[in-house]
Image: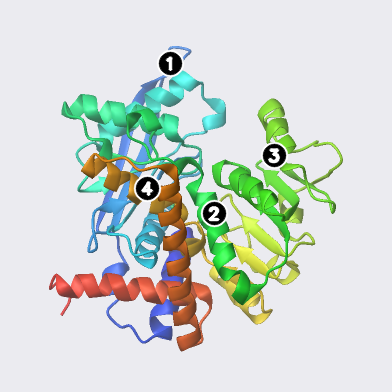
Amino acid sequence: MSAFENAMKQLEEAASAVGEQDVEILKEPKRTLQVSFPVRMDDGSIKIFRGYRVQYNLARGPAKGGIRFHPKVDLDEVKALAFWMAVKNAVIDIPYGGGKGGVEADVKKLSEAEKERISREFIKAIKDFIGPKKDIPAPDVYTDSKVMGWMLDEYEKLTGEHSPGVITGKPLSLGGSKGRAFSTALGGVYLLEAAAKELTPGKKAAIQGFGNAGSNVAGFLSERGYKIVAASDSKGGVYTKQGLDVSALIEHKKKTGSVINFRNAENITNEELLECETDILIPAALENQVTKENAPRIKASVISELANGPITPEADKILEKRGIIVIPDVLFNAGGVAVSYFEWVQNNTGLYWKEQEVLDRLKEKMSQAFAEVLDASKKHKLSLRKAAFALAIKRIIEAERDRGNIK
Ligand code: GLU
């Protein structure tokens, strides 16, 4: 099944679990833009790149969600990711709809200058579609604050105005927010803390993916006394029962380009990581990692989705039957967009907050969202994912009704 088919399955299951009937409006994105644009490569040749921006739902506010660069990006995936953003933004109750963008590009094969030209050309191609009150991009897989800086600059050059609120996850010098660089990971950690009483997950964690979210969550958890028994990236993973020295591992990846071949640890594959001996499994890479094939072999008692869409609906069912608790992406990784929202508020007001204020507000958002989702899950006897989706769908549909878009 495709990512979007999976997303629609989740929608239907949650809607039927709570008897919500008016969900037709959520089965199609509101707006979809596909663009292609030429970019001059370093060797002088011209290459055509394809990109997408999807505004899934706009009832609760402007579209909001990241832009990823990945060779396998396609419209189906971006639609799924945009839908999940609409759900996520409603779960944590921030005044946004959902959106997402992507460019089919293999960052590992690009020079810095080529990456910059792709970023700028993509913005040229979508500039009328986005805006601080229309659709607000941010970083995602293989994009970061540097890319956001180029994109903001291009947008402002094209429009002739300063508009820091058009994009979040920017460098601090351009109106970025303190805390945004690590807020996806820290939001997840705050959530685990809020959930600790309910879920008592244990202190061993395995992390698939060692990008911004994965490496930061490894750092925060090990500072808090968790043992990171395994970590991986696109080249493979490492495992040690004793727990990895996370700061040394981060250094090792910086030097060698990967976590593999780390001293005192055994090399494992990404598949082995998912099935390793651990209390908490944290997928922090891409979609469709836990499937009906490997779900029966997962040993973790809690899976916290730092990636978007890492568990297929079929795998979800198997995990639920096996009593494995899944903290869903739309809740667990919402700290990224929560601080994006704070960044946008700061841009709109022109008043910039201290880091502690950002972190206090993030903590409050995450614990409030967890409490509401937990409450819904107990009330309707649903998994956390279904409860989170049900809560979000209710909020979105309410906004659509209040607008008179559905009666
Ligand atoms: N890309 C992140 C996500 O998937 C953050 C989006 C944002 O900050 O708008 O939630």
Q: Residues within 10 Å of mark 1 (few under 14, many from 20)?
A: few
Please say which color scheme the image uses.
rainbow
State the residue position of label 2.
307
- CA neighbours of label 4 inside 10 A, class few (<14), some (14 to 19), many (20+): many
Tag 2's secondary structure? loop
- Ligand 1 neighbours mark 4 (CB distance < 8 Å): yes
- 74 left or right of 151 in image: right
- Foreground disc of the pair 2, 3: 2
Could you tell which of marks 1 and 2 lies nearer the N-terminus? 1
Residue 406: x and y, percent? 17, 76
Q: Secondary structure at mark 1?
A: loop
Q: Which residue is denoted by mark 4 in the rendering?
A: 340
Which dot, 4 or 1, sits closer to the camera?
A: 4
- Count numbered badges in the picture: 4
Q: Amino acid at mark 1?
A: Ser
**Residue bearing mark 1:** 45
- What's the CA distance linking mark 4 and mark 1? 37 Å
Q: Please tell me the numbered disc located at residue 235.
A: 3
Q: Amino acid at mark 2?
A: Ala
Q: Earlier in the sequence, mark 2 or mark 4?
A: 2
C-alpha gap between disc 2 and disc 3? 17 Å
Which residue occupies 67% across, 49% down? Answer: 223
